[in-house]
């Protein structure tokens, strides 16, 4: 399949329209000089990924991604930024001085993955694009074949919740306890 | 008889209610673990009653199965498949019911219950009691999982579980840094050995296409060629794992340090059950060693012999009463390992069985003493006989059993080992083992003399322990006396047979030698060695002196003849002189002084010298030297590598990513 | 549509994530980069699911699991960062050289 054939499909226009902004936002996540901007670019990236999922007719996963990331995780990360008092303005020291080696490594990784997948999948096409809803099947799978992993993941979440509280909680010093008791 | 029984039993699949529900034993201790952690603090005994209750219920199953195995033996297993690797390598959990595992259920649950009850009294008012009982229950559960294992994977699960519980309990008093280090040392040494176990299990699993013990037994007996090809390597790797858990030379170094834990822990884990895990593994895989891995057995016998003889000497110079018993345990484990390796399946396991009772008894007795005088050192004890009569008499019974005095349990099991060694052609080893029996008796006499006789040298007023502690001592003293009778060579008790037959109830015939009758020569020599050791130790150490150190100090005769003569002329010879008169008296005196004392002192002194030499030369310099050498090498390498170690996480991450990329590229382009 | 376009997009996002992981000084931003990498993995999973069209919807099921575990990871990660910040008054990765002997 040549590029001309590829670009002739209208669905690929939609893909490009979503993918290019997503890529840009993803790039800005790691290069933005403002912490809050980086977090907001991640929101946009996640939105783009969710849109791609919709394109692949995986609507449940798409909405789950939006709810969890945009709704919860980013808020959590923003709280983290506030609490650790990161400078919220433009900060030129947000990235370290040593950027060449990471850059080379990232490029090498990208080249390697791209080359390997071109070798492996070449022009394999997607089959179920645009076909109805897969949510029903997904729900069925989660409570039948994958019910035990599903429960286990639930326990992992619970464990993370308790662990997070335990780690982040600070025991009051005796002085503070006294003050609290006085009030 | 037993071979026939085993062959028939293989086809039996019935078993009844208690076989079907034996899995309860594996679950209850873990439930107790959770329950104690959850609300142990609120209970009057701080959770101890839950642990005791769990093991008491377990005992119903353990004792019933043990009796059932006597009258209507079955070999069966109940397994549930948990997962699969590939298409045919399955992973199952479950429990085995056969002679060996039933014996271990009995041992773990009955000794465990007595030790738990004892611990109620011993730990009363101590720190973190709920955690103690929780970890102890965890140990009991893991140990039962180990001995119930129908395959290597479950065995490893239990194996690591008991290691973890051991780590928790050795470092129980973690406020003292030394205890933490002891726990770490035990964990590290065991982990090193576990590498061998894991590799051995992996090799066996891949070659056989199964981890199941019963299938391994059949393959081993039928001489499967694929298994025969790897049997020696896999057998040695398994043995390396067993060396760590069962404290065989030179991996025994962790066990004396492990005495840092509370005494009930030492009694149950580091004497009676956990450290016998390695012996159990050897017994469980015995057909592999007996039929295929015969070349591996020579090394195993040598290691076991070094352990039983060399390490026993260290007990001669230890001051800490628990260390005396710890070195003694290592030595006894050496006996078991030597026996199993030489082909004495029954002999080794029978000694495991009897040893568990009398060594637990000795440790609990030592704990009772420690409880009374608040010190581990025999230099703070002495003269406790009149203060603690129950502890004293039960301790003496345990010591006599350990020393192999007729007709106590240790006599029969040690005799069985000696006979097996002689029969399998290890005559030299047999004589070394007899010499080891002499040393065993000698240091036990020393321990009794220094602890219970003479005048009290410690502080405060010692008192007998409460009944909750002394009753388990009495309960353990009974099997220490009687259980040897279960396996008198050639004797079958009406209706139940004997221990050899019970133990022979396995999927395949073990093919080890069973004596038809008592070998009076070997039994006699072993008994004489034990009695001589006791008498000699008694003569040297029973005298009361200014300090315990003075009682313990034993000068080498050739170097300090005057000093020695001063002691003996005053004491022994004077008594004789007063009674008899004239030349006869002088002759008797002379005989006493020069010949009798000379022999006594020379023998004792040589033994002590050898003990010191082994302790200082081999243990402290040799083994510890290797450890220190390794440490120094690591230290040097660390200094060189230090420049690379910036501590910056992201540099490490970059190296990690780079490594992953290189590896991926290698897989893509090269392979 | 071909599968390769999604895989390349995923690879690009993943590489961005790796770059951010290695250069960002602020630990919260490091965590952000990790999230980016996980999103890239999710794209691959869903795309391969579309390609293979398994009857059990394996790719999407695992995407759900990845998202869940990622949420747990953010929670724990932030708690750790908070703890580090509280003890050392800094949330910068290059100032944490505690792993050095």
Image (tube, rainbow, N blue to C red):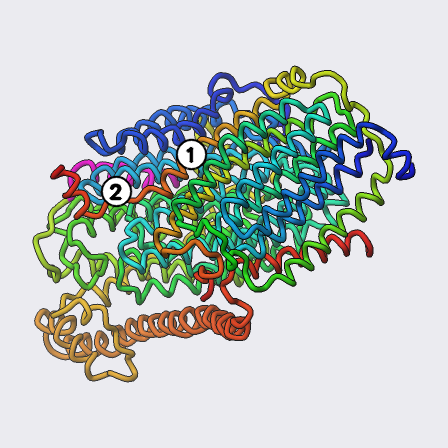
Which secondary structure type mostly characterizes the magenta part of the structure? helix
Q: Which residue is farthest front? A: A89
Q: Which residue is mark 2?
A: B128
> Percent from the top left, x then y, of residue B46?
23, 34
Query: Alpha carbon of mark 1 to alpha carbon of mark 2: how far?
Result: 27 Å
Placement of B658 over or under B154, stated as above or below? below
Q: Give me the residue at 22% from left, 42% from top.
A: B123
Residue at figure coordinates x 20%, y 44% from the top left: B126
Crowding around mark 2 (Cα neighbors within 10 Å: few <14, some 14 to 19, many 20+) is few
Judge whether residue C99 is colored magenta.
Answer: no
Magenta highlight on residue B472 = yes
Q: Nearer the viewer, mark 1 or mark 2?
A: 1
Asked if one can make out residue B76 in the rendered structure from this viewpoint, the answer is no
Q: Is residue B85 left or right of residue C69?
A: right
Q: Is label 1 in a helix, a strand or a loop?
A: helix
Tell me the quadrant of the picture where the N terminus of chain B can be found. Answer: top right
Residue beneath disc 1: A161
Residue stretch in magenta: B465-484
Under circle 2, the secondary element is loop
CB contact under 8 Å: marks 1 and 2:
no
Q: Is residue B343 above or below residue B6?
A: below
When the figure is inspected, residue A93 is found, relative to residue A169, above or below; the finding is below
Q: In front here: B59 or B604?
A: B59
Residue B325 position in % (x across, y down): 33, 55
Q: Which mark is residue B11?
A: none
């Amino acid at each position: 399949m040549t590029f001309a054939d590829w670009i002739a499909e209208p669905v690929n226009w939609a893909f490009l329209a979503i993918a290019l902004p997503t890529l840009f936002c993803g790039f800005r996540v790691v290069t933005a000089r403002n912490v809050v901007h980086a977090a907001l670019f991640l929101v946009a990236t996640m939105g783009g990924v969710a849109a791609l999922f919709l394109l692949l007719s995986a609507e449940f996963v798409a909405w789950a991604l939006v709810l969890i990331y945009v709704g919860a995780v980013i808020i959590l990360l923003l709280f983290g930024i506030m609490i650790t008092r990161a400078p919220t303005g433009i900060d030129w020291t947000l990235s370290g001085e040593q950027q060449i080696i990471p850059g080379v490594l990232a490029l090498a990784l990208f080249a390697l993955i791209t080359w390997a997948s071109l070798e492996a999948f070449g022009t394999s096409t997607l089959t179920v694009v645009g076909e109805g809803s897969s949510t029903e099947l997904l729900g069925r799978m989660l409570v039948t074949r994958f019910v035990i992993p599903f429960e286990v993941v639930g326990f992992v979440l619970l464990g993370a919740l308790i662990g997070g509280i335990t780690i982040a909680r600070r025991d009051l010093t005796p002085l503070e306890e006294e003050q609290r008791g006085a009030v | 008889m037993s071979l026939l029984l085993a062959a028939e039993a293989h086809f039996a699949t019935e078993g009844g209610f208690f076989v079907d529900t034996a899995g309860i034993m594996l679950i209850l201790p873990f439930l107790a673990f959770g329950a104690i952690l959850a609300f142990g603090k609120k209970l009057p005994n701080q959770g101890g009653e839950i642990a005791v209750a769990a093991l008491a219920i377990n005992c119903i199953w353990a004792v019933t199965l043990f009796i059932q195995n006597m009258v209507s033996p079955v070999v069966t297993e109940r397994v549930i498949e948990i997962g699969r690797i590939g298409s045919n390598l399955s992973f199952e959990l479950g429990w085995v019911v056969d002679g060996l595992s039933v014996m271990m259920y009995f041992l773990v649950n009955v000794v465990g219950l007595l030790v738990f009850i004892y611990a109620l009294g011993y730990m009363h008012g101590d720190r973190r009691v709920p955690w103690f009982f929780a970890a102890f229950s965890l140990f009991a559960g893991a140990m039962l999982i180990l001995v119930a294992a129908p395959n290597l994977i479950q065995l490893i699960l239990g194996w690591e579980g008991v290691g973890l519980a051991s780590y928790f309990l050795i470092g129980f008093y973690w406020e003292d840094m030394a205890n933490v280090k002891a726990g770490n040392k035990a964990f590290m040494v065991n982990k090193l050995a576990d590498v061998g176990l894991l590799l051995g299990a992996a090799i066996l699993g891949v070659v056989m296409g199964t981890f199941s013990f019963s299938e391994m037994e059949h393959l081993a007996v039928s001489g499967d060629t694929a298994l025969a090809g790897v049997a020696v390597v896999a057998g040695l790797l398994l043995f390396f794992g067993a060396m760590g858990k069962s404290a065989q030379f030179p991996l025994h170094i962790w066990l004396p340090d492990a005495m840092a834990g509370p005494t009930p822990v030492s009694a149950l884990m580091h004497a009676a059950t956990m450290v016998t895990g390695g012996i159990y593994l050897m017994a469980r895989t015995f057909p592999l060693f007996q039929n295929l891995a015969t070349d591996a057995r020579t090394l195993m016998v040598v290691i076991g012999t070094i352990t039983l003889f060399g390490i026993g000497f260290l007990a001669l110079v230890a001051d800490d009463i628990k260390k005396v018993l710890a070195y003694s345990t290592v030595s006894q484990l050496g006996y078991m390992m030597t026996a199993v390796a030489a082909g004495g399946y029954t002999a080794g396991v029978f000694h495991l069985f009897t040893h568990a009772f009398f060594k637990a008894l000795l440790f609990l007795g030592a704990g009772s003493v420690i409880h009374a005088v608040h010190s581990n050192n025999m230099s703070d004890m002495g003269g406790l006989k009149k203060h603690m009569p129950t502890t004293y008499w039960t301790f003496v019974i345990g010591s006599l059993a350990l020393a192999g005095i007729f007709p106590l349990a240790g006599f029969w099991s040690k005799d069985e080992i000696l006979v097996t060694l002689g029969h399998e052609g290890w005559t030299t080893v047999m004589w070394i083992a007899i010499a080891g029996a002499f040393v065993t008796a000698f240091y036990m006499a020393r321990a009794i003399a220094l602890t219970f006789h003479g005048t009290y040298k410690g502080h405060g007023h010692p008192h007998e322990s409460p009944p909750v502690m002394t009753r388990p001592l009495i309960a353990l003293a009974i099997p220490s006396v009687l259980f040897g009778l279960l396996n008198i060579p050639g004797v079958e008790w009406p209706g139940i047979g004997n221990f050899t037959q019970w133990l022979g109830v396995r999927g395949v015939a073990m093919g080890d030698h069973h004596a038809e009758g008592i070998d009076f020569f070997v039994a006699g020599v072993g008994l004489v060695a034990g009695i001589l050791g006791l008498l000699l130790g008694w003569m040297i150490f029973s005298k009361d002196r200014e300090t315990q150190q003075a009682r313990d100090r034993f000068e080498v005769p050739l170097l300090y003849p005057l000093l020695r003569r001063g002691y003996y002329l005053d004491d022994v010879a004077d008594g004789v002189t007063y009674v008899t008169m004239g030349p006869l008296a002088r002759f008797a005196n002379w005989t006493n002084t020069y010949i009798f004392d000379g022999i006594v002192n020379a023998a004792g002194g040589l033994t002590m010298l050898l003990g010191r030499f082994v302790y200082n030369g081999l243990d402290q310099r040799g083994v510890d030297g290797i450890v220190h050498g390794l440490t120094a090498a690591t230290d040097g390498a660390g200094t060189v590598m230090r420049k690379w170690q910036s501590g910056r996480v992201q540099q490490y991450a970059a190296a990690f990513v780079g490594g992953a990329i290189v590896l991926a590229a290698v897989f893509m382009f090269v392979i | 549509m071909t599968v390769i376009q999604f895989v390349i997009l995923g690879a690009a996002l993943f590489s961005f994530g790796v770059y951010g992981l290695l250069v960002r000084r602020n630990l919260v931003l490091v965590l952000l980069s990790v999230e980016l990498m996980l999103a890239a993995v999710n794209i691959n999973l869903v795309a391969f699911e579309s390609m293979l069209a398994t009857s059990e919807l394996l790719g999407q099921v695992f995407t759900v699991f990845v998202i869940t575990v990622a949420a747990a990871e953010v929670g724990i990660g932030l708690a750790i960062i908070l703890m580090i910040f509280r003890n050392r008054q800094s949330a910068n990765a290059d100032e944490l050289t505690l792993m050095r002997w």
